[in-house]
Amino acid sequence: MDITEAILERKSIRGFKSDPVEKSIIKEILNISVRAPSAMNTQPWEFFVITGEVLNNMRKALVKKLKRLEPMNPDHLVVGWPKESVYRNRQVGLAKQLFSLMDIPREDSVKRAWWLERGFRFFDAPVAIIVVTDKSLSESGPLFYIGAVVQNFCLAALKYGLGTCIEDQGVLYPQVARDMAGIPDSKRIIIAIAMGYPDWDFPANNVVSTREPVENITTWVGFED
């Protein structure tokens, strides 16, 4: 698979097999990922790779907080979608496709709650990666470069037959990760990645997300038609 194929074929995986992922494979993926660019080669990223009983305990703790309706307090602002915006419309379109594939009617609050919990369980993936940066850096400065290293990670994972889902649910209650994965207070928790071998029989993995046509989002300057 070349780089173009990887970019076009990568998708968010929301259903995984229970098979473990070897530490040596994850290390290879990380070694590829950290070739991402960063300003002045500052490399403002660190990784906590979590599996086994620790990850299972994290799932339980996150879902418990969610069910208790405890206030979420992520270390940095997560993405929001203004109402009546194109961004919100795209998000709703994806949700409709997911719920249709998963046979979750709009009025079924039980199934919708179950689906919400899956995100806080890292979609039951056998591995979760928590990406952090140092609090000595500005809050927004490292985000661009962390995005680059996370994209590298998700693309490199395909080489090993692994699927990924970039998700913020796993970091909305950051103290859980701090307590269970030993993430120090000096680090700002940015994003989580769920990873494992895809279960292609899981309906949500059949989602095909759309993209806005390039002509709608590109302004050409100085080119001759």
Image (spheres, rainbow, N blue to C red):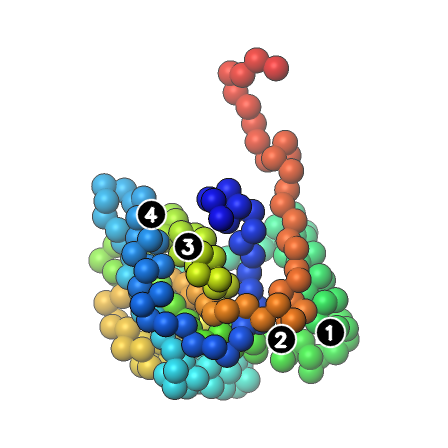
Please name the amino acid that badge 3 sits on. Answer: Ala
**Which comes before the other along the chain, label 3 or label 4?**
4
Q: Which residue position holds label 4?
A: 36
**Closer to us: mark 4 or mark 2?**
4
Is the residue under label 2 in contact with that under label 1 (CB below 8 Å)?
A: yes
Q: Find numbered disc 1 in the image and state the secondary structure of the residue it sits on.
A: loop
Q: Quadrant of residue 132?
A: bottom left
Q: Distance between the residues labelled 2 and 3?
A: 28 Å
Asked whether 12 or 2 is in front, the reply is 2
Q: Is residue 96 left or right of residue 125?
A: right
Q: Which residue position holds label 3?
A: 156
**Which comes before the other along the chain, label 4 or label 2?**
4
Is the residue under label 2 in contact with that under label 4 (CB below 8 Å)?
A: no
Q: Residue at x 31, y 81 (%)?
A: 179
Q: Quadrant of residue 216?
A: top right
State whether residue 71 appears in this view. no
Please tell me whether residue 86 is drawn above or below residue 105 in the rendered image: above
Asked whether 95 or 175 is in front, the reply is 95
Q: Find numbered disc 2 in the image and state the secondary structure of the residue it sits on.
A: helix
**Which comes before the other along the chain, label 3 or label 1?**
1
**Which comes before the other along the chain, label 2 or label 3?**
2
